[in-house]
Image (cartoon, grey):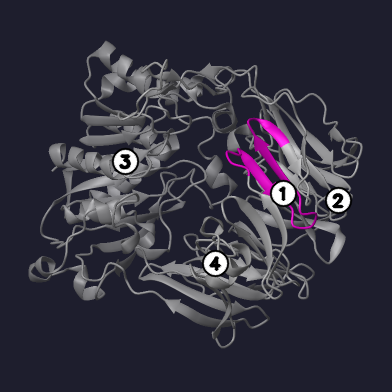
């Protein structure tokens, strides 16, 4: 099998430590999970140095605990803007309880005014740091479920005890709802956070109108999660020691789902109206956007089959429908994930993202819905939008045009389509754009670079200044060799990218136990051009214990275009397994891989893949650890599940084929299943049902539960989790 390979030896030196001598290995320090794992006591010390910044218009502000400084983008000189003592002299005036403790979270909402927004925990203040006066103060509300502040009107919208409120700049608060409850949800993310939804409150540009979601989920089934008290909890008089119900609303695939409507509150009139979008039954409303003049609302409307998407405009004053501006259908599914963006220099035109040509790209429309042009095109995807440069009439965006495993920052001229690369063309970049669109702070890593931060002046020929080159936080430790390459998918034509982590002190004449780490599902990837090719620190811990780690992004994962993702439609896990086995086939060609000692581990979709691989290929995989695994897609949520599988009623064959219940009898190797008892994403019913199936056929998986934990383990429990995963492979694979 032919593969393309890139080799990186991350650590003190490059190539020489790729095959480190035993004497060097012994001389270096050993990692612990307390250092490598999120939640570990020393985890923060093992991360590369960074700097925290925000923008004041086009001025870059460095945020530190005790001061804010302006950074000159050309000379990199830093000048103090104000100190923590300066701010406390204004806001605390000798009162210790009123003191601001840190400046890390300061923001500058007005590009043309010397005003800093500062939160003390009790208040949100607008402080003029030139006049040294407080311009306005708003009391913080404890226990809010959602909130959003508008810098233009100074109004704050928030949800408290399920009710929606708006507080104006003067502090007057109005309660907008009375029927909020766990059944009627206001101002929060709906449709289980699918379709790019991150919240439920949307201020108009003028700040005088608030659009918000209202979700009626009274008809949705309650799933009976349980709250287990902490072991040191002591009940008050009259309270029971017993665990208490903690039900969650969970619309399973093919079952009754919630109904969503969109309201609009007008501060000036005090009235609330709802958009006349018709019957919300079995429909999804997403990516809400305002027109620049605050008179019109736009949103994408999707049918429950998720194959018919429409962009519709509404009158924000009356709620009446204005027009259907765009429609996109697909034989499999359409997934609107981005709101339209109006051009700052032309309020009659907007940019829309869609992958209708096979890859996610920009298209220019007028406000009547006429497509004017396709702005970007190619076998790569637009990954994010950072903003606009109005003077140059360009969009500043992120894509993987340089390489399918990279993330780079570009500009594209909307009028002529000219694209300009705004970084070094390597690695994985996360940039933020200044208010005027003229500068970038570019925080990035490369396979051998733990972190760099550059400041870029945007132009036809961008000027890039390096502001920080972080030291390797792992210097002095035994570090494995990280390699990356590509191989062909099961279809024989598609390139798949992989990462390999070789055991510390690697000896090519030896054979090593190998763990395949897998996710494999949509909206995620494991292999990229960031530090150590995106390697999870647990992989380094396992390499230290003498394991080889292998990670492959199969078809169905993100950032590779529509056909790549949709290859798994109606048959989740099948194409993915075949691609993963191409990776195993490659592993078996390597003389240092022990083909009799191959294990597999994954979480969530990766847990589903772990059990799928272990039971479909029992002759290959000896040991598996599956965390939070989907067992049968009919128990997963409607929005995600039906997009990729249709409903159980429409696709009974697909659901039967992908279900792991019937595979319980095929379990030959050792399997440990782990779940959080309060997992609201992949419900514990998945694990319990698989255990029942195993009991019925006489197979013997191991099972561990984290009481009180959701889908992912939090804090130090994550260290415990990875200790357990590691020990399982130590016990049964090594």
The local secondary structure at tag 3 comes to helix
| Spatial separation of the CA atoms under disc 2 and disc 1 | 15 Å
**Foreground residue among 467 and 497:** 467
First in sequence, mark 2 or 4: give its number.
Answer: 2
**Foreground residue among 550 and 230:** 230
| Spatial separation of the CA atoms under disc 1 and disc 3 | 37 Å
Q: In this view, does 610 lie above or below 399?
A: above
| Spatial separation of the CA atoms under disc 2 and disc 3 | 47 Å
Q: Mark 2 points at which residue?
A: 294
Which mark is nearer the camera, 4 or 3? 3
First in sequence, mark 4 or 1: give its number.
Answer: 1
Q: Where residue 518 sits: x, y (%)? A: 36, 43
The local secondary structure at tag 4 comes to strand
**Residue shown at the point (42%, 42%) measured from the top left:** 520
First in sequence, mark 2 or 3: give its number.
Answer: 2
Specify whether residue 692 is in view. yes
């Amino acid at each position: 099998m032919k593969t393309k390979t890139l080799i990186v030896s991350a650590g003190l030196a490059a190539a020489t430590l790729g095959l480190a001598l035993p004497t060097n290995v012994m001389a270096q320090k050993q990692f612990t999970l307390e250092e490598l794992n999120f939640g570990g006591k020393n985890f923060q010390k093992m991360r590369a140095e960074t700097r925290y910044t925000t923008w004041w218009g086009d001025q870059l502000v460095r945020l530190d605990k005790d001061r804010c400084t302006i950074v000159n983008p050309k000379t990199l000189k830093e000048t103090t803007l104000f100190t923590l003592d300066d701010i406390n002299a204004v806001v605390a005036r000798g009162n210790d309880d009123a003191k601001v403790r840190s400046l890390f979270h300061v923001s500058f909402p007005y590009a043309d005014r010397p005003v800093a927004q500062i939160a003390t925990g009790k208040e949100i203040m607008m402080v003029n740091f030139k006049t040294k006066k407080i311009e306005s103060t708003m009391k913080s509300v404890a226990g809010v479920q959602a909130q959003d502040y508008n810098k233009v009107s100074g109004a704050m919208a928030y949800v408290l005890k399920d009710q929606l409120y708006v507080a104006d700049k003067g502090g007057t608060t109005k309660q907008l709802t009375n029927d909020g409850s766990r059944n009627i949800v206001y101002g929060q993310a709906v449709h289980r956070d699918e379709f790019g939804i991150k919240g439920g409150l949307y201020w108009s540009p003028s700040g005088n109108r608030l659009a918000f979601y209202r979700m009626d989920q009274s008809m949705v089934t309650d799933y009976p999660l349980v709250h287990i008290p902490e072991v040191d909890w002591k009940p008050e008089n009259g309270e029971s020691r017993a665990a208490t119900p903690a039900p969650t609303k969970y619309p399973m695939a093919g079952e009754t789902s919630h109904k969503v409507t969109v309201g609009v509150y007008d501060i000036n009139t005090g009235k609330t109206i709802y958009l006349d979008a018709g019957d919300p039954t079995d429909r999804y409303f997403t990516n809400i956007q305002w027109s620049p003049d605050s008179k019109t609302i736009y949103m994408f409307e999707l049918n429950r089959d998720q194959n018919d998407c429409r962009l519709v405009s509404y009158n924000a004053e009356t709620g009446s429908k204005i027009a259907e501006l765009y429609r996109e259908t697909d034989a499999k599914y359409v997934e609107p994930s981005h709101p339209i963006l109006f051009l700052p220099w032309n309020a009659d035109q907007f940019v829309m993202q869609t992958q209708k040509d096979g890859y996610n790209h920009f298209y220019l429309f007028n406000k009547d819905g006429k497509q004017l042009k396709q702005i970007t095109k190619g076998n790569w995807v637009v990954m994010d939008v950072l903003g606009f440069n109005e003077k140059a009439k360009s969009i500043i965006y992120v894509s993987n045009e340089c390489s399918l495993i990279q993330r780079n920052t570009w500009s594209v001229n909307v009028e002529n389509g000219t694209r300009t690369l705004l970084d070094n063309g390597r690695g994985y970049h996360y940039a933020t754009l200044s208010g005027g669109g003229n500068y970038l702070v570019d925080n990035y890593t490369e396979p051998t670079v733990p972190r760099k931060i550059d400041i870029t002046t945007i132009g036809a020929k961008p000027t890039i200044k390096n502001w920080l080159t972080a030291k390797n936080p792992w210097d002095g430790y035994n570090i494995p060799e990280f390699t990356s390459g590509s191989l062909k998918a099961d279809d024989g034509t598609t390139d798949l990218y992989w990462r390999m982590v070789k055991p510390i002190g690697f000896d090519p004449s030896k054979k090593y136990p190998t763990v395949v780490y897998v996710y494999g599902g949509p909206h995620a990837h494991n292999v990229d051009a960031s530090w150590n090719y995106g390697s999870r620190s647990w992989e380094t811990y396992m390499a230290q214990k003498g394991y080889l780690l292998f990670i492959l992004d199969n078809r169905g994962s993100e950032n590779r275009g529509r056909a790549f993702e949709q290859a798994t439609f109606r048959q989740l896990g099948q194409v993915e397994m075949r691609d993963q086995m191409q990776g195993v086939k490659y592993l078996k060609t390597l003389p240092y891989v022990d083909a009799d000692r191959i294990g597999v581990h994954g979480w969530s979709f990766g847990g589903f893949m772990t059990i799928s691989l272990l039971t479909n290929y029992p002759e290959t995989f000896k040991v598996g650890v599956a965390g939070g695994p989907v067992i049968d897609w009919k128990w997963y949520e409607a929005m995600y599940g039906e997009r990729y599988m249709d409903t159980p009623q429409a696709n009974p064959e697909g659901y039967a084929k992908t279900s792991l219940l019937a595979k319980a009898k095929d379990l030959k190797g050792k399997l440990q299943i782990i779940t959080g008892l309060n997992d609201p994403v992949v419900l514990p019913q998945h694990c319990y049902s698989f255990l029942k199936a195993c009991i019925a056929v006489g197979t013997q998986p191991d099972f561990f539960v984290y009481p009180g934990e959701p889908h992912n383990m939090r804090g130090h429990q994550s260290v415990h989790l990875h200790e357990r995963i590691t020990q399982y492979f130590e016990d049964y694979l090594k």
